Image: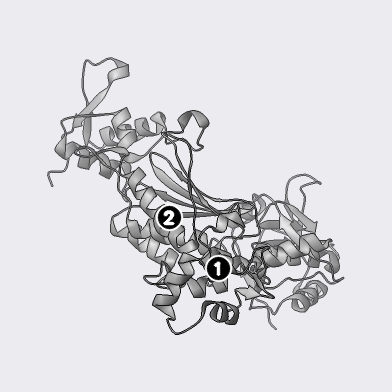
Amino acid sequence: MTITISQVDEVRVGRILGRDEGQFCDFKAKEIKPAKLSVTLAAFANADGGEVFVGVTGPKLGPMRWDGFENPEAANDHIQVIEQLFPIGDVCRVSFLESPKEKGLLLHIEVDKTIDIRKATDGSVFLRRGAQNLPQDTEEKLDRLKLNKGISSYEDMTVSATTDTITNSLVTLEFMLEAVPAAEPDAWLTKNRVIVGGKPTVAGIMLYSDEPQTDLPKASIKIYRYKTSDAEGTRAALDFDPIAIEGCAYKQIYAAVEKIREITEKIPLLGIEGLVKISYPTEAIHEIVTNAVIHRDYSINDDIHVRIFDNRIEVQSPGTLPGHVTVKNILAERASRNSKLVRLLNKFHNPPNKDVGEGLNTAFQAMRSVKLRDPVIEQKDLGVLVSLRHEKLGTPEQIIVEYLRSNEEINNATARQICFIGSENTVKRVFQKMINAGLIDRIPDLPLNKTGYVKGKNFPIS
């Protein structure tokens, strides 16, 4: 296979050498043993993917320095190891980087997160965490890695409960009457593998038990209301004690969405025309809550946490993204940690997961339809955090201009509220740019702590 040589300019050289080693990036000297290189590549594949630059010295020897291979053939041993671990071009991309003022060729390796577990050349398993490759050298660690990747699923584990917990529940009675009226609950649930060996599974409990939290205590949704726009919620900012939403997965989803709507609609929002009710698209809330319930890792002893702030909703669900899914490809890729729960929930009347696999795409479209910014998805250590921010699409300048169309004047505090900017100095810089452009004028003869602004000579008429 021919590996291309790409030319890079001084700017990109600086950007490469200026990067920090961490969760998604590593630097290796060209002298690294191929077997040791395989450890880093496998660790990236078992985590969230990443890239390795081979032919860089440092940081222990001082600043990062480009010191590449003399020619492509000098990297043959390294490339052979890469081909042994990955089909190049499939989940791994390899190229050489060359720069006129730098010594030799850098070997640039990009590794995607894989759906399976990848091993180093000696058969050992590693996982990337920060700037470290951590050995997964116990059964417990390997089992956790399998759960994280979706190779095994905790939804199939049996629970120490009697089968009548789900065969005689009100949920099952209602479900059977609507979905499969000709079948007997015991036989149907056994056939669909939510009763195994005379015991209900985790999926069976979450779908068909009237009170699943009796057997899975940390399988509820906790809702918090923080009266602040700060980055973190504190006990002092809590509006009321956290609300626990319990019940089967189907009822949990609909009850949580309704409660979130009820709480958010009571949050006052300063808009262009004064105080208005804050509003998030119901479809976005519904899809993100549904996604959290059906894709969370039920082996982790934690609830789903919904935090409602003055300017955003955060939904944090236990478990890493499953399979090969990352925050970068999540809208295009599909992987289900709890495939049985997803499939059977879709059989309920008015299923919450109508368009299987399209939930987050729907949430993005719903936010855009009301001109709010896209949801923000983050992978935390043992959880996925999705944030819906009540931030209008548009620059601060555009929002301030729109505000002044309906109001005589504006000050820093008001601009921070309508633009969702936390920093007073940031707004000062926006105002200064607008003054320089003639869009606004400072109101004269006001003390500094009461500075206000009105339309300027270049303020747009329409």
Nearer the observer: mark 1 or 2; the answer is 1
Point 39% across, 29% down: residue? 424
Crowd band around label 2 with a 10 angstrom C-alpha radius: few (<14), some (14–19), many (20+): many
Q: Which mark is residue 166?
A: 1
Q: Is residue 343 left or right of residue 153?
A: left
Q: Quadrant of residue 173?
A: bottom left
Residue 456 lies, with reference to residue 380, above or below; the image says above
Which residue occupies 86% across, 65% down?
33
For the point 42% across and 70% down, which residue is it?
Answer: 174
Residue toward you, 96 or 453: 453
Q: Nearer the viewer, residue 12 or 398?
A: 398
**215 or 4, nearer to the observer:** 215
Identify the amino acid type marked 1. Answer: Ile
Q: Is residue 2 left or right of residue 247?
A: right
Q: Is residue 458 visible?
A: no
Is residue 430 shown left or right of residue 14? left
Say which element carries label 2.
Answer: loop
Residue under numbered circle 2: 375
Mark closer to the chain start, 1 or 2: 1
